[in-house]
């Protein structure tokens, strides 16, 4: 009984908190994975959002059972050519970070099966503060 009261007090106070930087919850908007054939690599895109502009977090890694390995990538421009390179982690600043073609993305390396348009795949994102977040990505060609 006491436990229930304490728990509901906690829920109410967090629900009304202006910005919960101590335990931020991330939300993932427009999660998509580019269609690709077995054996290939493909890019995964999304917008990572925190509850307010002041909040920060860090994406440390991503995991997907359908890939031989899963990396965090960014693009750099070298002599006018855009190249992908792995990054150790991705900071979420000012409340959001956008993963999009030609920029930050999650890279699925060595797909174990085809990714077909309209399918849904699961990827786990590991954040420094928010912990493990499981996300369903729609297989879709990015606009
Ligand atoms: Cu890449």
Image: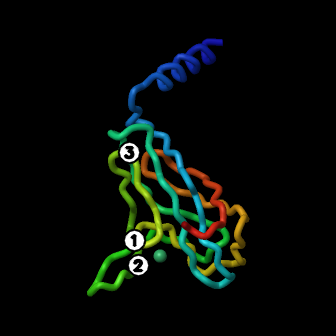
Disc 3 residue: CB within 8 Å of ligand 1 = no
**Does 139 appear above or below 11?**
below
Mark carried by residue 74: 1
Asked if 23 appears above or below 6 in the picture, the reply is below
Residue at (73, 65) in percent of width and height = 119
Please name whichever residue, 139 or 141, is drawn nearer the observer in this view of the structure. 141
Residue 2 sits in quarter: top right
Left or right? Give the position of 140 relative to 131. Answer: right
Task: Establish whether ligand 1 lies closer than 8 Å to the Cβ of label 1.
Answer: no
Classify mark 2: helix, strand or loop.
strand
The mark nearer the N terminus, 1 or 3, is: 1
Which residue is pictured at 57% across the width and 73% down the height?
A: 108
Which is more N-terminal, label 3 or label 2?
2
Q: Position of residue 69 (x, y in %)?
A: 56, 75
Residue at numbered disc 2:
84
**Quarter containing the N terminus:** top right
Q: Are marks 1 and 2 in contact (CB under 8 Å)?
A: yes
Q: Which residue is mark 3?
A: 95
In whole angstroms, how far apart are the C-alphas of marks 1 and 3? 19 Å
Q: Residues within 10 Å of mark 3 (few under 14, many from 20)?
A: some
Classify residue 91 by image quadrant: bottom left
The image position of residue 26, as x and y in percent, is 49, 45
Q: Nearer the viewer, residue 25 or 120?
A: 120
- Check the image and name the residue furthest to the left: 79
- The answer for how far apart the CA atoms under marks 2 and 3 are is 25 Å
- The 10 Å Cα crowd at callout 1, few under 14, some 14 to 19, many 20 or more, is many
Query: Label 1's element?
Result: strand
Mark 1 / mark 2, whichever is N-terminal: 1
Beta carbon of the mark 2 residue lies under 8 A of ligand 1: yes
């Amino acid at each position: 009984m006491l436990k229930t009261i304490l728990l509901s007090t906690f829920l109410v106070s967090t629900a009304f908190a202006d910005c919960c930087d101590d335990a931020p919850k991330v939300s993932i908007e427009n999660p998509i994975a580019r269609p690709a054939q077995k054996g290939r690599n493909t890019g995964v895109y999304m917008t990572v959002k925190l509850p307010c502009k002041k909040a920060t977090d860090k994406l440390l890694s991503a995991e997907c059972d359908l890939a031989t390995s899963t990396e965090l990538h960014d693009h750099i421009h070298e002599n006018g050519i855009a190249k992908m390179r792995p990054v150790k982690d991705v900071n979420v600043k000012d409340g959001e970070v956008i993963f999009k073609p030609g920029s930050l993305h999650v890279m699925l390396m060595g797909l174990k099966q085809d990714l077909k348009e309209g399918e849904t795949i699961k990827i786990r994102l590991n954040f420094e503060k928010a912990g493990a977040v499981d996300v369903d990505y729609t297989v879709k060609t990015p606009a």
